[in-house]
Image: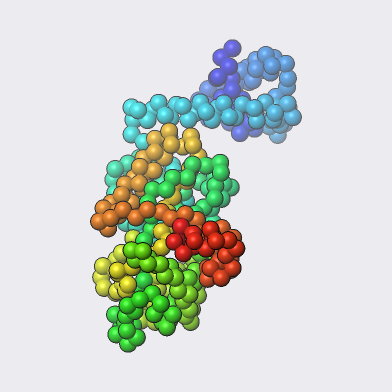
Amino acid sequence: MDRLRALHYFTACADERSFSRAAQRLGVSTAAVGKMIGTLEHDLGIVLFERTARGLLMTAAGQRYLHACEPALAALAQADEEVRGFTARPKGTLVVGIQHTVARGCLTVALPRFHARHPEIELDVRDVHHVSDETAAQVDVTVVVGWPKVEQLVKREIAASRFVVAAAPSYWAVHGMPQHPRELAGHACLSIRGVEGTLLDRWSFERGDEREAVTVAGWLTVNNAHRDVVIDLAMRGHGVVRLLDWANGAELASGALVPALQDWESSEAPPVNLIYAPQLRRVPRARAFIDFVTEVFVDIDAARGQRIHPTERPLWLRRHYGKASQARETAGTAVERQRWNKGR
């Protein structure tokens, strides 16, 4: 008996719950399907299906056999796709989870270039907020900013984010541009909550050997999903915002937002991460997308003229403080305080 063919017939019958529909799907006769299933049952010494007037009902033994066979069939399908990838262009559907900030900031404008390069790959883009092993496993490849904690999946840091403090020219004209980070305490700073819910109200800076962190406040706070609100209001002259240079490059380049404290660098540089199952790296369409996203951020680094290195998971995120400023006030050890002051 051709066991591999028998397994394909068996899984088709399990999906369709009918010999005739399975036969149509496989492009063979109903009799051929029935004969193959009968031979398989005889060979295994079990009954896989109960034949009823309303179709096929899988037995408990059949369900156990299906569950045992699925990993081998999936591995075989993946092996087939990998081999075809050496001789054919990548194709098929790729489910991609992209954080809104990444999509808006750089990937949306780059996706047509990916499509032109790989016209047979269809992207199914999903919005991603909080990332875990469970949520990341629901898509093929995830692209997020920050410090997600995943254990079962590959997490590749492909770039770092650079924070910039900026406001509209009209705001600076009225309130004056700060010359030192401490002066931000006297400005209306529009704050954002991180994806974990922490209020990012402590902005840290470094210049050479100098370290400075200031607790900011203003009249508006939004969660991460509404970060565009503070960007829009800042462009209308209603306050100061801390933004990612690559996420809001257009606003900075046009002069709608003017950066301040350019001789200082942010002490926090959240990484840009690609997250995927280990075996996906060998699937041609996934590999094509992973390589493309990496290329996009290599170009961003080149445009900066310098390489920004990601910093470690910050103290306020490691302990899930309600406010980032509380982490500095309640840090329990000298090591934690030192890491916070250094932005490491």
- Residue depicted at 65% across the width and 30% down the height: 67
* Residue 256 visible: yes
Q: Quadrant of the N terminus?
A: top right
- Residue depicted at 26% across the width and 53% down the height: 302
Q: Residue furthest top?
A: 1
**Residue 53: image x %, image y %?**
72, 31
**Residue 224: image x %, image y %?**
49, 66
Q: Is residue 36 left or right of residue 291?
A: right
Residue 228 quadrant: bottom left
- Residue depicted at 32% across the width and 77% down the height: 179
Question: Relative to 282, is 266 above or below?
Answer: below
In this view of the protein, which residue sits in the foreground, 135 or 19? 135
**Residue 76: image x %, image y %?**
51, 26
* Residue 138 visible: no
Question: Relative to 301, is 69 above or below?
Answer: above
Q: Is residue 11 left or right of residue 204?
A: right
- Residue depicted at 31% across the width and 53% down the height: 307
Question: Relative to 39, is 156 above or below?
Answer: below
In this view of the protein, which residue sits in the foreground, 338 or 75? 338
State how many labels appear.
0
Q: Is residue 51 left or right of residue 326?
A: right
In this view of the protein, which residue sits in the foreground, 15 or 159? 159
Look at the image and name its color scheme: rainbow
Q: Is residue 154 left or right of residue 20?
A: left
Residue 65 quadrant: top right
